[in-house]
Image: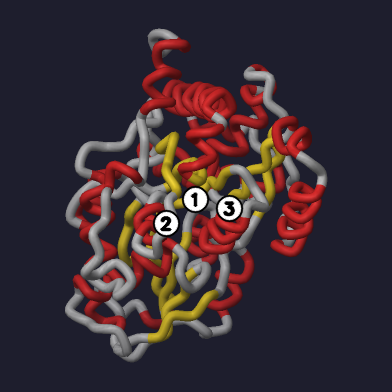
Amino acid sequence: MVRHHSRSLACAIAFGAVLASSGAALAEDKITIIVGGMEKQIYLPAVLTQQLGYFKDEGLDVELLNSRAGVEAENELIAGAVQGVVGFYDHTVDLQAKGKYIQTIVQFSQAPGEVEMVSSKLADQIKSPADFKGQTLGVTGLGSSTDFLTQYLAVRGGLKAGDYTLLPVGAGNTFIAAVKQEQIAAGMTTEPTIGQLLKTGDAKILVDMRTPEKTAAALGGPYPAASFYVQSSWAESHKEEAQKLANAFVKTLRYISSHSAEEIAALIPKDYYVGDKDSYVRGLAEGKAMFTPDGRMPDGGPQTVLKVLQAFSKNVQGKEIDLSKTYTTEFVDAAAKTLGSAQ
């Protein structure tokens, strides 16, 4: 079953300790995947795969753990506490610059699904990222993909580091509270938080990156975002498990592509609606185009991600990054052959 409630990172760490001490049998019997916010629509494929029973169809015992932000999830992967992460592809580039090799084996989305929201009280003052100067901006966590994208928008708007402040405020209720309490002037978030803020009128959309077209306008090209990534060494030594996971996720992406937002939402745990199913469905309908239909990396996507990170990240600047080692299509190509033509 999907764990509907948020589980603390301490829980994930504790699980990792148990996993490490209990022998190889358990590690092979259960696959643990940490998700950078299961309630976020950008990570819908993870929960939907569980709900549709596709993991079980592949003979897999998969547990999904929840974390506040992708940066926490990647840390657990590197520590060996989990086998995989559902998070943003850009972490594979960032980590390679630090000498750590992880790779995406299924690409969920071709757009971030993120929106830079501005407090309605400041909407007349902040009309573009160029107006971020002197402001406090909300991100899920420092070192997270929302951090990366926010910094790039600022650079593209002509600003430099130090012109603004980044504040980690998480997502969902904590993000909403930060807006209402005027802790942040603007911030980056996803559905269903976007819909909640628009409904109450507390914030407005400043930069929309929920579709490939809007993403290209904001970032200069396709931006592969939500993905399933693992340590490269794990993918090499656990090809059978990796293939089964890819099969399950590709089936889910096909399902998303061929079904309506209403049909998809009907399968999701009701607490993910945050008390407003209509808003949830509307947000999903508007953003469903972010998902790839086949799990493949969009052409030119890795290059856009590298360009974005090189624009501001001292960690990446000046480093030789081998993009071919940040993702593989081996497993989704095999899944396509196994599953046959899309229904």
Residue depicted at x 44% and y 36%: 105
- Mark 1 to mark 2 CA distance (whole Å): 8 Å
Mark 1 residue element: strand
Residue 331, compared with residue 120, is above or below; it is above
Residue at mark 1:
87
Scheme of image coloration: secondary structure
The residue at the point 52 percent across, 27 percent down is 239
Of marks 1 and 3, which one's residue comes earlier in the chain? Answer: 3
Please tell me which residue is depicted at 40% across the width and 16% down the height of the picture: 336
Given residues 63 and 186, the one toward you in this image is: 63
Q: In the image, what residue type sits under mark 2?
A: His
Residue 78, horizontal then vertical, whole percent? 56, 56
Q: Which residue was labeled with disc 2?
A: 91
Q: Nearer the viewer, mark 2 or mark 3?
A: 3
Which secondary structure, mark 2? helix
For the residues carrying marks 1 and 2, which lies nearer the camera in this image? 2
| Residue identified by numbered label 3 | 77
Above or below: residue 225 compared with residue 312: above
Q: Is residue 179 left or right of residue 54?
A: left
Q: How far apart are marks 1 and 3 (CA)?
A: 11 Å
Question: Does residue 263 appear in this view?
Answer: no
Q: Quadrant of residue 166?
A: bottom left
In x, y percent, where is residue 55? 64, 25
Above or below, 17 against 122 in this view is above
What quarter of the picture does the C terminus occupy? top left
